[in-house]
Amino acid sequence: MKETTGFPPIAPEAIIEAVEAHLGTFLEPVLHPYRSYVNQTYGLRDEDGGRFVVKFYRPGRWSHDAIAEEHRFLADCAEAGLSVVAPLPSGSGGTVGELSGVRFAVFPFRSGRTFDVYAESDWERLGSLVGSLHRVSGRRDAPARLRLDPAETTAGHLSALRSSGLVHPELAERFFSLADDALELAARRFRSLSSAPIRIHGDCHRGNILDPADGTLVLIDFDDMMVGPAVQDLWLLLPDRLPAARAEMEAILSGYERAIPFDRASLALVEPLRFMRQVYFLHWVALQTGDPDFADRFPDWGGRAFWVTETEDLATQLDWIRDE
């Protein structure tokens, strides 16, 4: 398993100078760190009170081309009139900077609370937002991004976990037996899908949707952007499993289909996608086990009790896939 490299130490003064050079403006000499699961992000202000966010991409995770495709997707959305937060270009026109070998991008700061759902019309608004996003998605491909597919992505993640030896030896046989069964069923479902994969947000839950004062929903954090089935950007919005949230999904699809048609047969992918997301995050955290601060950030990760829970969760998820 190829581990990511973690972040080298970078002085705050160097970060401020790099962002000043990128924007061509002077900034206040203060950095405001933001909590981030993956990247390092900081808030800054210029001398006129303008606010910015600089995101340093975790080394070893995305290539320059992959980051550029995230930015291109955001630019496509902005040009189509969608409310997204697109990166700011430098004086040379590029949106990807580099400091001490770490790639970064600068974004305008956007405020807003997480969108709360109170009525059927709110679910329809969410569906309309994602439908408008997907209407833009099909305009181009993103070959440097991950492809959300059991054979192309999840199988590799499981192979890496298997060879890493990180799964507790008492649980490994059962864990991978369950995972292989779930993978086979997921691949079968994907093969039956007739609609083509498109560029998707990838992590489209309500925590990544802002509701600012003007009432226009803003979709943020495209860091997990990938190519995959449209339904991936819908099921994460639901308050429960699909059988218990049919009314909410119907309202979402009502809003979605005002913008673009939806292949309702793809709803059969929801539980396989939930399994794939579980494996995706296990693999992603496993890549970070060599970080000096790994134990501090993930204190309960990797012990026997952890893998007992993960194995039981996997068994439950396999039952859900089979029962569908």
Image (cartoon, grey):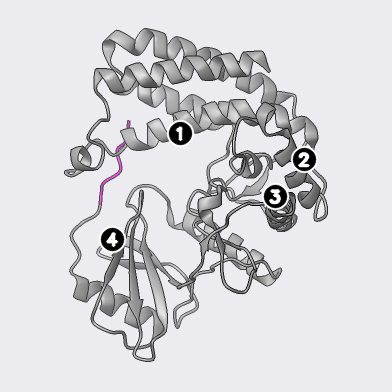
Per the model, the C-alpha gap separating discs 1 and 3 is 27 Å
Residue under numbered circle 1: 280
Which residue in the protein does label 2 denote? Answer: 250
Q: Nearer the viewer, residue 122 or 315?
A: 122
From the top left corner, tell me how far across and down residue 42 is, in percent. 32, 67
**Of discs 1 and 4, which sits in the foreground?**
1
Q: Residue furthest bottom?
A: 48
Task: Name the side, left or right, on which 125 lies relative to 186.
Answer: right
Disc 1, SS: helix
Q: In terms of image quadrants, where is residue 85?
A: bottom right
Q: Nearer the viewer, mark 3 or mark 4?
A: 3
Q: Position of residue 254 (x, y in %)?
A: 80, 47
Q: Spot the residue most to the front.
A: 118
Which amino acid does the dot numbered 2 rest on? Answer: Glu
**Are the two marked residues, 2 and 4, in contact with CB atoms closer than 8 angstroms?**
no
Of callouts 2 and 4, the N-terminal one: 4
Q: Earlier in the sequence, mark 1 or mark 3?
A: 3
**Magenta segment:** 1-6
Q: Which mark is residue 123?
A: 3
Q: Check if residue 3 falls in the magenta segment.
A: yes
Rendered residue at 19%/37% (across/down): 295
Numbered circle sitting on residue 315 = none
Q: Position of residue 63 (x, y in %)?
A: 43, 52
Amino acid type at image mark 4: Gly
Between 280 and 109, the residue placed more toward the observer is 109
Residue 196 showing in the rendered view: no
User: Which of the two discs, 3 and 4, labels the residue nearer the N terminus?
Assistant: 4
Near mark 2 (Cα within 10 A), the count class, few <14, some 14-19 or many ≥20, is some
Which amino acid lies under the numbered mark 3 shown in the image of this protein? Trp
Residue at which label 4 appears: 101
> Mark 2, mark 4: which one is toward the viewer?
2
